[in-house]
Image (tube, rainbow, N blue to C red):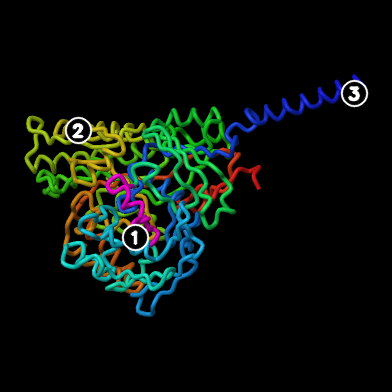
């Protein structure tokens, strides 16, 4: 009997030991169902009216939910609404909200929340800074923004508690795509009124209506989200807790993944040959195309860039092949003012077919000679060089890109140009760009929807994301005329817009960017095959051993 007891006790001890081992070591990142992802930097802002950078958008996808969004195949889907209706004249949109949608504190998400948010976005006192132009077609929006009308006259109405109506001044077949942008998210009035200027700056001042809510936020370190138990679709949210890391250095990110301390890296892991990553990580390595374009932007408010010969010279001297194939590696050269592959490659040849751009096919040495000749015509010499400050982010990828561009221009111009690099953290960088406080800057733009206007709007003089302050009446006219046309006419006018803007050389486009990430084999649900917008939420993911 004593021997039996000893055997039973031993068995129990073995089982307990095994369970303890499994708890602490057997599923390292699965412990407590915590999903860990690096988002590359601290979050600039979670205020939907100021939110446009990729890092902030990634967090917003988890904590907020609007009327419509995109799935990972780039298809529109209903989130905060169950369905919608569009009038025959394409000027009235009616959204029927989910009656079981709630804020994290249990309050219902109502049509009034959307009305309050959109009125606040156009109010001159609290006006939105990013994507404001996406509201311009709403009835009376422009007049409210310029102070001519009261915000209560905005064409947005709560017909009842769960019915939202939006009226446009002009038909715009793109409008449903605009709805997916953060500026259309609802916000929680009682929280805004309680925290005022501190709203969105700390966990308690952010009221979520999405699948997760913020538990803690340590700036420049990490952010922890927990499942929102009041979320209408909580049963389909399989991951209980999310930890966002804010690692800026790609090498550190890579090693953190190697040690099993994160499930998904940021996209700026060190630039190596794809074969190296595949050899080490196999299917964990993900390489996929997205609608992202890199460019050098001139501050066109600065007189030294007013001469088109200067802007053309920088375009000629840019060594796109070196940047794309030797520095970035996950990119191909770009010459157009918009992403050449947008809308199923419809705009791929617009700029290359222009006679003015015949220089594209010239050898690098000839391009450099032409570039120097243009600058000397303007009056620059080695004794009187053009001095340039190039603003860029301070992460590893952008440091490498910036150093290469500095070297490219300094060599190509043979002393006619002196380039100084100015590095800033993400928040400071974005703030400077949005306020037009730069000389030249390395910018990237990732499409919010797969239509050319998502890039061409950056060249319209009165849009908030025209960071370089380009202005051309013909471009403005083509853009706004295109939105009220049939789809065929829209595409034709967008083609004309692209060619017109390209002839002004307002920017130096240099790369179409693909993304590379490492994703743990413990995670499923991340679909990058058709995800050209790189849209996903932790709600889409789950641990493979979690049913």
Is residue 195 part of the magenta span, yes or no?
yes
Q: In the rendered image of this protein, does residue 543 appear above or below residue 383?
A: below
Q: Is mark 1 on a helix, strand or loop?
A: loop
Mark 2, secondary structure of its residue: strand
Q: What distance separates the C-alpha of mark 1 from that of mark 2?
A: 32 Å
Per the rendered image, the range of residues in magenta is: 178-199
Q: Which mark is residue 419?
A: 2
Residue in the picture at 68% in, 28% down: 20
Q: Can residue 316 be seen in this view?
A: no
Mark 1 and mark 3: Cα distance apart in space: 77 Å
**Which residue is nearer to you in this view: 447 or 348?**
447
Give residue 246's position: percent from left, percent from top. 41, 35
Circle number at residue 4: 3
- The residue beneath circle 1 is 452
Q: Nearer the viewer, mark 1 or mark 3?
A: 3
Q: Which residue is drawn at 51% across and 54% down?
A: 231
Where is residue 428 shown, x and y percent of the image?
Answer: 26, 38
User: Which residue is the extreme one toward the bottom?
Assistant: 88
Q: Are there few (<14), some (14-19), or many (20+) residues within 10 Å of tag 3?
A: few
Label whose residue precedes the other's in the sequence (1 or 3): 3
Residue 467 on the magenta span: no
Cα gap from disc 2 to disc 3, whole angstroms:
82 Å
């Amino acid at each position: 009997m004593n021997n039996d007891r000893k055997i039973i006790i031993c068995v129990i001890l073995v089982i307990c030991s095994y369970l303890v081992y499994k708890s602490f070591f057997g599923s390292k990142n699965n412990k407590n169902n915590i999903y860990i992802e690096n988002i590359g930097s601290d979050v600039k802002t979670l205020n939907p009216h100021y939110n446009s950078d990729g890092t902030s958008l990634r967090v917003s996808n988890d904590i907020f939910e609007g009327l419509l969004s995109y799935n990972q195949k780039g298809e529109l889907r209903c989130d905060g609404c169950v369905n919608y209706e569009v009038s025959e004249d394409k000027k009235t949109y009616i959204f029927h909200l989910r009656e079981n949608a709630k804020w994290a504190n249990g309050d219902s998400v109502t049509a009034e929340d959307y009305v309050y948010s959109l009125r606040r976005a156009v109010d001159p006192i609290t006006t939105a800074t990013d994507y404001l132009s996406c509201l311009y077609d709403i009835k009376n929006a422009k007049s409210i923004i310029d102070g001519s009308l009261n915000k209560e006259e905005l064409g947005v109405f709560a017909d009842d508690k769960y019915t939202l109506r939006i009226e446009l001044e002009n038909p715009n077949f793109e409008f449903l795509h605009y709805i997916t942008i953060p500026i259309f998210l609802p916000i929680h009035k009682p929280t805004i009124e309680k925290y005022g200027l501190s709203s969105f700056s700390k966990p308690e001042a952010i009221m979520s209506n999405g699948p997760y809510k913020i538990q803690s936020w340590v700036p420049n370190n990490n952010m922890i989200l927990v499942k929102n138990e009041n979320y209408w679709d909580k049963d389909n949210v399989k991951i209980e807790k999310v930890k966002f890391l804010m690692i800026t250095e790609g090498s550190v990110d890579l090693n953190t993944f190697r040690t099993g301390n994160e499930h998904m890296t940021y996209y700026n892991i060190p630039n190596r040959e794809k074969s190296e990553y595949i050899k080490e990580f196999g299917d964990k390595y993900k390489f996929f195309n997205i609608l992202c374009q890199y460019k050098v932007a001139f501050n066109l408010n600065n007189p030294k860039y007013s001469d088109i010969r200067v802007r053309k010279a920088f375009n000629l001297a840019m060594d796109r092949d070196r940047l794309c194939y030797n520095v970035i590696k996950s990119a191909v050269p770009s010459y157009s003012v918009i992403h050449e592959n947008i809308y199923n490659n419809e705009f791929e040849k617009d700029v290359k077919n222009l006679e003015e751009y015949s220089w594209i096919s010239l050898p690098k040495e000839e391009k450099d000679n032409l570039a120097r000749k243009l600058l000397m015509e303007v009056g620059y010499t080695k004794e009187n060089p053009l001095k340039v400050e190039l603003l860029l982010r301070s992460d590893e990828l952008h440091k490498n890109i910036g150093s290469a561009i500095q070297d490219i221009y300094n060599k190509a111009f043979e002393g006619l140009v002196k380039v100084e690099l100015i590095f800033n953290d993400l928040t400071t960088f974005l703030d400077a760009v949005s306020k037009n406080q730069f000389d030249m800057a390395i910018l990237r733009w990732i499409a919010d929807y797969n239509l050319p206007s998502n890039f061409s709007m950056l060249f319209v003089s009165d849009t908030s994301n025209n960071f370089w302050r380009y202005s051309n009446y013909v471009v403005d006219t083509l853009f706004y005329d295109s939105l009220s046309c049939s789809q065929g006419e829209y595409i034709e006018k967008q083609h004309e817009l692209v060619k017109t803007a390209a002839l002004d050389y307002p920017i130096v486009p240099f790369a179409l960017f693909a993304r590379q990430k490492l994703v743990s084999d413990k995670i499923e649900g991340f679909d990058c095959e058709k995800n050209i917008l790189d849209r996903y939420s932790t709600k889409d993911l789950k641990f493979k051993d979690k049913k």
